[in-house]
Image (spheres, rainbow, N blue to C red):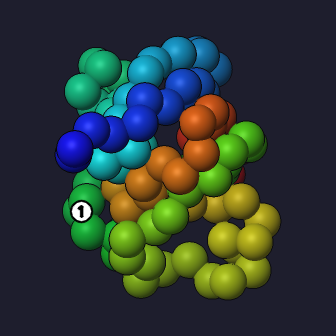
């Protein structure tokens, strides 16, 4: 009881690819920072858009979003500080925004 599923995550940032294993209970940004990936961020509250990235594979659920339009979300943009993994394999690209 209380176990979380492990997620295969690939993060692309500054033309580097990082492969990590993460929990569905942590945001993409927290998982990146936990693995010493120099991901962009500032407010961590879903309002500044510094942590914006594009999801290339998989799915996430954003806990809060004060900045992205529905069209931007439909185009694959996410706020990684608010994005919780909802699929078993995810690719996130900070460079493609």
Q: Viewed as shown, does residue 77 lie left or right of 49?
A: right
Residue at 35 percent across and 55 percent down: it is 81
Q: Is residue 52 visible?
A: no
Q: Is residue 63 left or right of residue 19?
A: left
Question: Along the horizontal axis of the image, is 97 left or right of 64?
Answer: right
* Residue indicated by mark 1: 43
Q: Secondary structure at mark 1?
A: loop
Crowd class of label 1 (few under 14; some 14 to 19; many from 20; radius 10 Å): few
From the viewer's perspective, tell me whether residue 34 is left or right of residue 23.
left
Q: Give percent across and percent down for residue 37.
A: 36, 23
Residue ID at (59%, 45%): 87
Measured as percent of width and height from the top left, residue 79 is found at 47, 60
Depth order, front residue of 52/30 = 30
**Dividing the picture into quarters, in which one does residue 89 lie?**
top right
Q: Eyeballing the image, is 57 above or below 22?
A: below
Q: Residue at x 26, y 69 (%)?
A: 45
Q: Position of residue 16 (x, y in %)?
A: 58, 16
Percent of width and height locating residue 24 = 39, 44
Does residue 17 appear anywhere in the picture? Answer: yes
Q: Is residue 32 above or below residue 94?
A: above
Residue 13 sits above or below residue 68 on the image: above
- The residue shown at (49%, 31%) is 7
């Amino acid at each position: 009881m209380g176990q979380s599923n492990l997620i295969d995550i690939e993060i692309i940032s500054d033309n580097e690819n990082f492969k990590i294993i993460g929990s569905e209970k942590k945001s993409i940004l927290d998982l990146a920072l936990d693995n010493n990936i120099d991901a962009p961020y500032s407010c961590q509250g879903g309002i500044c858009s510094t942590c914006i990235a594009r999801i290339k594979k998989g799915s996430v659920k954003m806990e809060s979003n004060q900045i992205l339009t529905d069209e931007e979300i439909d185009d694959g943009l996410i706020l990684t500080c608010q994005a919780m993994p909802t699929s078993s394999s995810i690719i996130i690209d900070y460079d493609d925004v």
